[in-house]
């Protein structure tokens, strides 16, 4: 990831569209491909999975090529029991997953409720926090909203670990003067834009197109999955923020707080038990 070559530019090397459906009636759930069949193909396809959109992709290997038309490559599910069906608003939690067209799991994004509440209470602003897991590795990537003052655009940050302990840091920053909720992704080490997210709210569901403008990162599946997951957040984030603000006010007023879901708690487990040798524990 820390390539010395010039990064970013105007060429779009990879395009990933997350097109959210208007209704629950679509080809991925009707007919031959029924929910039971998807469940048999991956344990990640939970019983409460609601298919909410499709993934399409297009890519080139060289800037001399022309980007081909988008081709459907997978679908997106929302865990309905945690979001739509949870009666207690305090315990609602946003969880989505990405799958290939054949039903193979690609990535999951989970709302970190306790972290969001802590950040929001500290800053007195609704601040969102998410964890992303992808099939590329066993690491958890945290995407956290950052408060940069009242005049700054909406901003999120995350980092990716590279070989030999190096890492790259990225900022997802709202664009100014655009019709939709559009974002640019900036790579710190080169201070340049390497990707953008184009949000289209022309239909009821919405389409969120990730454009990777860096040939190194276009080949990095981990990076691409993170931006795919984040693009879906754009559609739901205002609802999440409004709910977060109400819950904090309710907690302060009544003393009744949310319960932390065991799956969220599992993302906070001590990773050193899995990644460090017994001898290394004496050094930490």
Image: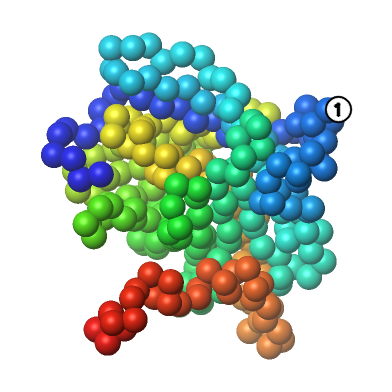
Q: The N terminus appears in which quarter of the rendering?
A: top left
Q: Which residue is mark 1?
A: 31
> Which quadrant of the figure has residue 206?
top right
20 left or right of 69? right
Q: Residue at x 71, y 70 (%)?
A: 91
Question: In which quadrant of the rendered image does the C terminus lie?
Answer: bottom left
Is residue 78 shown to the viewer in this render? no
Above or below, 4 against 267 in this view is above
Q: Residue furthest right?
A: 31
Residue 282 picture location, percent across and down: 27, 87
Residue nearest the viewer, comparing 133 with 14: 133
Q: Position of residue 246 (x, y in %)?
A: 66, 70
In the foreground, 246 or 59 = 59
Q: Residues within 10 Å of mark 1 (few under 14, many from 20)?
A: few
Q: Seen in the image, is 270 located left or right of residue 111?
A: left
Identify which residue is drawn at 36% across, 25% down: 13
Identify which residue is drawn at 82% across, 42% down.
36
Q: Give coordinates of residue 120: x percent, y percent.
A: 50, 71
Residue 262 appears in view: yes
Give the image location of residue 125, x and y in percent.
Answer: 50, 68
Q: Write the residue at 64% across / 31% down.
A: 101
Which residue occupies the extreme front position in the image?
278
User: Element at badge 1?
Assistant: loop
Q: Quadrant of residue 40?
A: top right
């Amino acid at each position: 990831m820390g390539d010395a070559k010039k990064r970013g530019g105007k060429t779009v090397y990879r395009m990933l569209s997350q097109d959210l459906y208007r209704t629950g009636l679509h080809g991925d759930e009707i007919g031959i491909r029924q929910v039971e069949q998807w469940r048999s193909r991956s344990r990640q396809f939970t019983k409460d999975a609601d298919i909410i959109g499709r993934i399409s992709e297009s890519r080139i290997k060289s800037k001399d090529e022309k980007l081909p038309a988008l081709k459907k490559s997978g679908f997106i599910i929302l865990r309905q029991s945690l979001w739509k069906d949870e009666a207690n608003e305090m315990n609602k939690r946003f969880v989505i997953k990405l799958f290939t067209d054949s039903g193979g799991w690609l990535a999951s994004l989970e709302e970190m409720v306790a972290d969001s509440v802590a950040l929001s209470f500290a800053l007195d602003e609704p601040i969102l926090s998410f964890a992303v897991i992808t099939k590329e590795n066993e690491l958890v990537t945290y995407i956290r909203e950052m408060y940069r003052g009242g005049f700054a655009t909406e901003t999120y940050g995350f980092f990716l670990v590279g070989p030999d302990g190096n890492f790259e840091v990225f900022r997802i920053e709202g664009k100014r003067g655009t019709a939709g909720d559009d974002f640019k992704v900036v790579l710190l080490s080169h201070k340049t834009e390497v990707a953008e997210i184009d949000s289209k709210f022309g239909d009821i569901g919405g389409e969120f197109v990730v454009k990777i403008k860096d040939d190194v990162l276009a080949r990095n599946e981990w990076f691409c999955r993170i931006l795919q997951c984040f693009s879906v957040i754009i559609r739901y984030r205002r609802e999440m923020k409004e709910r977060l603000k109400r819950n904090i006010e309710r907690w302060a007023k009544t003393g009744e707080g949310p319960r932390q879901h065991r799956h969220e708690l599992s993302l906070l487990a001590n990773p050193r038990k899995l990644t460090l040798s017994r001898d290394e524990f004496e050094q930490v």
